[in-house]
Amino acid sequence: MTEYALILISTILVNNFVLVKFLGLCPFLGVSKKLETAIGMGLATTFVLTLSSICSYLVNEYLLSPLGIEYLRTIAFILVIAVVVQFTEMVVHKTSPLLYRVLGIFLPLITTNCAVLGVALLNVQADHNFVQSALYGFGAAAGFSLVLVMFAAMRERIEVSDVPTAFRGPAIALITAGLMSLAFIGFSGLVKG
Amino acid sequence: MEVAVTQNGKRRFAMKLWSFHGGVELPGHKQESTIRPVEPAPLPKRLILPLSQHLGAPAEPVVAVGDKVLKGQIIARPGGFVSAPLHASSSGTVVAIDEHAVPHPSGLSAPCITIETDGRDLWVEREQQTDYRQLEPADIRETIRQAGIVGLGGAGFPAFIKLNPGKTIKTLILNGAECEPYITCDDMLMREQADEILRGLLIIRRAVQAQHCLIAIEDNKPEAAHSLQKALQRIESDADNIEIVMIPARYPAGGEKQLIKVVTGQEVPSGGLPVQIGVVCHNVATAAAVYRAVEHGEPLLSRIVTITGGAVAEPRNLEALIGTPVMELLSACRTNFNVLQEVIMGGPMMGIALANHKVPLIKTGNCLLTVSHGEMEQHPAVQPCIRCGNCADACPVSLLPQQMYWHARAKDFDKIQEYDLFDCIECGCCAYVCPSNIPLVHYYRFAKSEIRSQQEQKRKADIARERHERREQRLAREKAERATRHARKKPGTTDENKRAAIQAAVERAKAGKQGAPSDDV
Amino acid sequence: MFKKALSSPHIHQPPYSTQGMMFRVILALLPAAAAYAWLFGWGVIINILLAVGVALVCEAAMLTLRSRPLLPTITDGSAILTALLLVFALPPLAPWWLTTIGVAFAIIVAKHLYGGLGFNPFNPAMIGYVVLLVSFPRELTLWSLPAQLAEHTLDFRATLNYIFSGTLPTNLTIDALTSATPLDVMKTQLGLGQTTSGIMAAQPVFGFMGGKGWVWINLLLLAGGLWMIYRRIINWHIPVSLLGSLLAISSLFFLLDPEHSPSPLFHLFSGAAILGAFFIATDPVTAATSNTGRLWYGAGIGILIYVIRSWGGFPDGVAFAVLLMNMAAPTIDHYTKPRVFGHGDKDA
Amino acid sequence: MLKKILISAILLALFGLIGATLVAVTHEMTAERIAANHREALLKRLNALVPPSRYDNDMVSDTIRIIDPELAPRRYPVTVYRARLMGRPEAAVFFVVAPDGYNGAINLLVAVNHDGTLAGVRVVSHRETPGLGDAIDEQRSDWIYSFTGRSLDNPDERNWAVKRDGGVFDQFTGATITPRAVVKAVYKTLKYFSRHREAIFVRETTPVEIKHE
Amino acid sequence: MSDHQYADITRSGLWSNNVALVQILGLCPLLAVTNTTINGLGLGIATTLVLVASSLIVSLIRNIVRTEIRLPAFVMIIASLVTAIELAMNAWFHELFNILGIFIPLIVTNCAILGRAESFAVKNPPLPSVIDALAMGVGFMAVLIVLGAMREAIGSGTLFADAHLMFGDWASILTVTLIDDYRGFLLAILPPGAFIGLGLLIALKNYFEARSEKRRKSERIAQPAATAAHS
Amino acid sequence: MLSAALALTLLALVFGLLLGYSSIRFKVEGDPVVDQIDDLLPQTQCGQCGYPGCRPYAEAIASGEADINRCPPGGEQVIQSLADLLGREPKPLDPERGEEKPPMVAFIDESDCIGCTLCIKACPVDAILGAPKQMHTVIAEECTGCELCVEPCPVDVISMVPVEEDITHWKWPLPKTENGDSP
Ligand SMILES: Cc1cc2nc3c(=O)[nH]c(=O)nc-3n(C[C@H](O)[C@H](O)[C@H](O)COP(=O)(O)O)c2cc1C
Ligand SMILES: Cc1cc2nc3c(=O)[nH]c(=O)nc-3n(C[C@H](O)[C@H](O)[C@H](O)COP(=O)(O)O)c2cc1C
Ligand SMILES: Cc1cc2nc3c(=O)[nH]c(=O)nc-3n(C[C@H](O)[C@H](O)[C@H](O)COP(=O)(O)O)c2cc1C
Ligand SMILES: Cc1cc2nc3c(=O)[nH]c(=O)nc-3n(C[C@H](O)[C@H](O)[C@H](O)CO)c2cc1C
Ligand code: SF4
Ligand code: SF4
Ligand code: SF4
Ligand code: SF4
Ligand code: FES
């Protein structure tokens, strides 16, 4: 039980994928201009990430490892991810055109959201079992969504601030992300090892 | 909170009062103008009567330049259902129907009828009214409508509409709060014409069939309350279920929704009207005007206006004809024009700064507040908002003024509406307490007018789109028809003609399906 | 004769102007600052003067670069306050370059890149402090000994010399003048498996309730804070929920395991909790704005302080907790809009 | 419709086939060299502590794995690389973990000569505070070299500690925890070695996967 | 395609549509590895290689992939390429691999690569695609190097430290120590420094653009006036 | 090696089937985005964007063919709302397309109108009334100010006049900020 809690605390706070591990930055900056969009993206990513880390676990455990072809891991995982994303995209497109428009080019970009592949690979590296893999994926996504939503709310405020012209847009957003990651250093040491 | 309530002049029971969030305590500045009794203002040489002194469609003139008019004669008829007629406030000659400066924040001109008075103040023939008790509610409303009575409490909403509730009215409230500083016209009216107010109340009560009547007065006007109590005793027989309630003086207790909350504990739903919760609220002056219209056949020709402020040597209340130029009213109270910096029509919290000194008094003009040099801290340097939240604490509607300000600043009109901009009553409490001197209300007005204009543009765009689509369809149809005609001329139908014919048929079917009007041009 | 039309209201009477607020907060800080200097020596005063100077210079420079009017902004007191609060977080013998970097980062990056007063999402003073903490952890952990403990004290000249050139009188080393802070000692010793009572008894930095000397500064800060609430410069919501949650969670753990959890009083009086509750978390610019939001915001800080102090990598968590909740403030605001008059009970 | 589905599937499968073949072929061609490279890298590390002149066996493969709480907590199994010269035990290199660093575990290589003296210590990876605890890193300071030549009784037991705790090893100003953790781990290893010296060299090899740190 | 268009593509890749500064893509590796200049250079080279190769292939097969499998097909191509390159480098250029090794798997998920495939290579023939990829890659590399240099100089007061690892031992002479006895402003090397550093670079680019835009505008105003004076 | 190739091929095949199936199962008809875009355009129908009307331009935007900064009558506001809708960065109006002007309305000097009906044919919203050989008038309420009728008039009697500001259409100006300018 504690172990699972630690996985969550670690992925969400201490080793936050975006602010500490530098994974998933592009959607973090790209889809954080509006709070509503960020919430949608957070949900989509959480769904995709959890699902794909489960699927990659299965593929690794029941296909790659038995056949001794671990060196195909990256390709197999990325394929799994791409399919999960494409599938999600089609479903969203059909069921919620608005969400689809809003997530726009970012749904396909979830594929290349390094966090997704990162989670799959890190799961293997850390020898996670099924539940751990799922939790790790979920935690990573929850951490991603948490900072994404807070970042979006901050950006809405910064958008209407009197920011010097050269800094408007991505520049001040990156600086804000930097200060956020500075604040997240406060969590370091919470989970040792 | 509980306060003592008087009924029939006797302390009867304690009545529960509620309170509203926020609000501010303001220095009253009311004594200055209550020393002298109300006096009639001198008859001006010219009366300028704007066609739009009320909410709704402007009135339409029924006189022409050169016409002689008598006092009380209709000179403009209502321009729609939500509108009010206009009457000549004195006898004389119509000398102009044109654009003239009016009291409006824009400082722009608007259509007005100008009458040169003849000094004789001759009345038109008045219909002598019977006892209101014999009148049907519908007749009362019609009389009020014909009298051009609009709400005298501020918004100028045509009074007869409010008296047409179509719902059972539990509570009829007369608003004698007069919560704005400086203004005392309602106070003086209640002191001096309590009987008229009560009679007006009885008439309105009959019109709306109200079960219960309240007269709400802020507790800083004991004389007014006393005078009304006396009057209440005088109408003993009719005084059932009429109560005078003293409410704590806290701006904006006089705001309709706030007042209803204070005396009934109920909240008028956002975007809704008091009638929805069985309440009708009128200003005390409106009641007095109703009385005069119903019992004396007098339309709304004059009102009591407070003339006060630092530049006025003799602050007081005058009974002035609608249309009197404000300069004449100021002169009548010996205003020192050398120190005069600004004139505000209305109170300091909600009034309009007059941009032009030629404007006339209008039906909703309850006060002329002069500002002398250095009297009020005028427009101090604006500083950035520090989100201190003072404004939110002061807002009687529980809005978040600072958030609305940030979005108005950024012209993010969608976001600002998420913060319920249109629930803002523009009371000014937020701006009053802002440590950074931000003209918050100005921002909300800016945003509201932009949004309204965008909606208007959207409406126009929709019409244009529809007309454009209809035209496109028509052109397509005409082309198709031409093609068929062409085809019929050449019997040896080529493939091309066949295709055109099919095309035309398809077009026709499409046009038909989309319900395009058969043939318009 | 008449002026150009402007919107109502035409009168305006806030309880305090923005400057008024800033200078009253500074006033409330002064007694504690005086005690701080009394207990920890001249370094405090030198650093305050240096920090305020740097803050004003940076503010002026940024305003000039952004071609903004200079006078109204530079006199609003906010930069002075930022500098003052930052000095409270720095060791009394902090070298000049440390103070300068911290203040400059606070004013230039944390404040002016966002547009200056009112626009910054993060508390500038805390950003300045945290930047120093992660960049120069060594310098930041060397605290002077309070007057009751110090065997040697530096006079004004020697302090000035040390701060600006790093040289000490020949017979002294920096180790003789400094030690770890009470919270740091507590954390380190607990990590070594000691018990709280053992640590409090064995280590000289501890006195009644918390660290020696620190208690006095904290009591004066508490007095200043209460005065600000009384004068309605700040609302009670943030201090109460912050200290309340900190007390609640520390009491819980203290009751469960008193030998390994410092007492609630220790938590209150040994670190920056009081300063944070009344002076830092209450920075209106970076806090949540609605009253409900403020309660959540304060409670979040209180809990994070405890979490970071007890299980995190830093001895005190106030700065990080404040910054983390600064991050959350806009989101909190979004979800704690008050119910607007005339709207149903819970409307989205 | 079915055709459409099939086309997609086959097309994707085709790409899969091509991609997988490409990678598989490359893998086939490179696998051996890569393994050799990894060995070499590890060897380079070990050689820094036990130079090639001192052994003639295949040190990288002559490994055992020890799980013993005396040496390190159970969750950190220790790998030992054994160096032999002409069949005689020469030195052992322990891949140990100092679990109590400021920010978690520190990975160390501790090389012990057969006579119980230290051939050297290196930090392989750590997460100590940059600028404070990271002075244990060879790249940052020479501190780690101060172990070379020491043994269980040089200094004596009381002095196997950082100076602040009354020992002989330097600490870094403001950071005592990190050096303390390293000193402790090294001392433990020495102690374990002195007790199990012979057993360590006679135990049968347990193959250990070579990983890149 | 004319030369003019190639020039446009190149300018767009290097400056006006720079992957890192304008499109804000490929950030993860960009921020993760730039704590030294040499790291930046290494990742830049590797990324450019993969970018060019993948653009070429995607452009070649652009007409046979269907929409529903486009994405999986592209990422599979990229992943295969990257894995193959990784294995090959590990075997034959082991020294270089030791430096770049950790970055290469990261390239698979560098969104800049898929981004280019999706937005340019699918719509264009091979040659322009390759040129575009090259320009984008070099633009990306330039940012990597500048950011790396900036963080290294501020964070540890050196430049090109570890150059020998990449270029061999002679390259040690490249290492420049800017200030002896520099304390190191750690923030620059830590994660926040990466974000803030890139933010400052973007702001700097914006500043230069605004300035040249202003100059262009004033020239545009000046010119007609001058021609008018002539006539 | 064979197993590697086979395994991945199999995996890809299965996924391919899944995607192929869902691409049909979740097929989306039409493009609601065009309607949303069209809804934001001012419907002046002036063609300044280079398309024969607002809807064609909307279609062009939706297909990615045209940028969002080509509509001068809509100006900054329309660009902003398009950017919001499509999640793109707003950019300044394309100067080649014209510039943002205050709202205008066409006015026909009726005394000189020869009744040629050319303007009626040009008006995209049927805002001109009149029959052949009779004088023509503009229904001001319905005129979008597109100026398309100005050019065709053989006797040059159509002019564009600015829409007059009056009290009902007056808008509160944006107040000055703390820096003395509008943000
Ligand atoms: C557009 C509009 C329509 C209204 N319709 C009615 C109505 O049908 N019945 C009614 O009793 N009051 C109606 N009112 C009057 C309001 O309830 C309110 O009394 C009036 O706006 C004056 O309020 P104030 O001076 O507080 O602003 C209407 C007001 C407005 C602005
Ligand atoms: C902030 C605010 C303050 C007001 N104060 C008063 C007041 O003191 N007395 C009053 O009669 N009406 C006041 N009004 C207007 C009332 O809301 C309401 O319009 C009026 O009482 C309705 O009566 P009427 O239709 O007879 O004018 C105020 C309105 C607002 C928005
Ligand atoms: C942010 C921060 C990071 C620290 N990092 C380390 C570290 O990595 N290693 C270490 O030994 N001490 C570190 N410390 C210092 C310890 O908290 C403690 O003060 C110190 O180890 C006690 O050393 P002393 O006995 O020399 O005073 C750090 C302190 C702070 C505030
Ligand atoms: C009650 C109060 C608390 C403040 N606290 C801080 C603070 O903790 N840090 C700081 O930099 N400024 C503080 N300020 C000053 C000012 O609000 C701050 O510099 C702004 O964040 C700058 O935009 C405070 C101001 C007030 C009124
Ligand atoms: S009162 Fe003024 S400064 Fe305070 S939050 Fe409101 S708008 Fe901002
Ligand atoms: S003006 Fe509007 S926002 Fe301000 S206090 Fe009044 S109701 Fe609230
Ligand atoms: S420029 Fe604008 S208004 Fe004119 S046709 Fe194009 S979209 Fe419509
Ligand atoms: S009348 Fe002229 S300007 Fe107006 S819409 Fe028609 S063509 Fe356009
Ligand atoms: S590189 Fe774009 S998300 Fe990581």
Image (cartoon, rainbow, N blue to C red):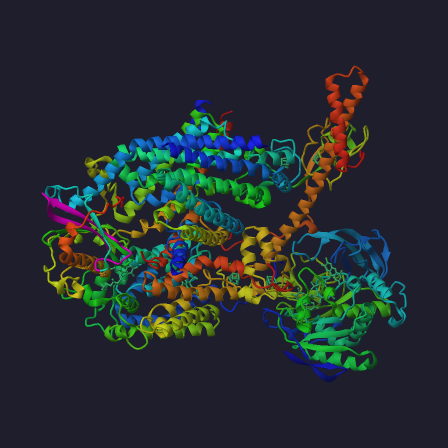
**Magenta extent:** D70-97
Q: Nearer the viewer, residue B486 or D198?
A: D198
> In the figure, is residue B498 to the left or right of C142?
right
Quadrant of the image containing the N terminus of chain B: bottom right
| Residue B142: quarter of image | bottom right
Q: Position of residue C297 (x, y in %)?
A: 46, 64
Which of the two residues, C130 or B332, is positioned nearer the viewer here? C130
Main secondary structure type of the part rendered in magenta: strand
- Ligand 2 is found in which quarter of the picture? bottom right
- Picture layout, residue E109 above or below residue C270: above
Q: Is residue B238 above or below residue E20?
A: below
Quarter of the picture containing the C terminus of chain B is top right
Residue F111 location in percent, x, y? 78, 33
Residue F86 vs D6, above or below: the answer is below
* Image x and y of residue C268, in percent: 37, 72
- Quadrant of the rendered structure where residue E10 is? top left
**Residue E135 seen in the current view:** no
* Residue situated furthest top in the rendering: B492
Rendered image quadrant of residue B42:
bottom right
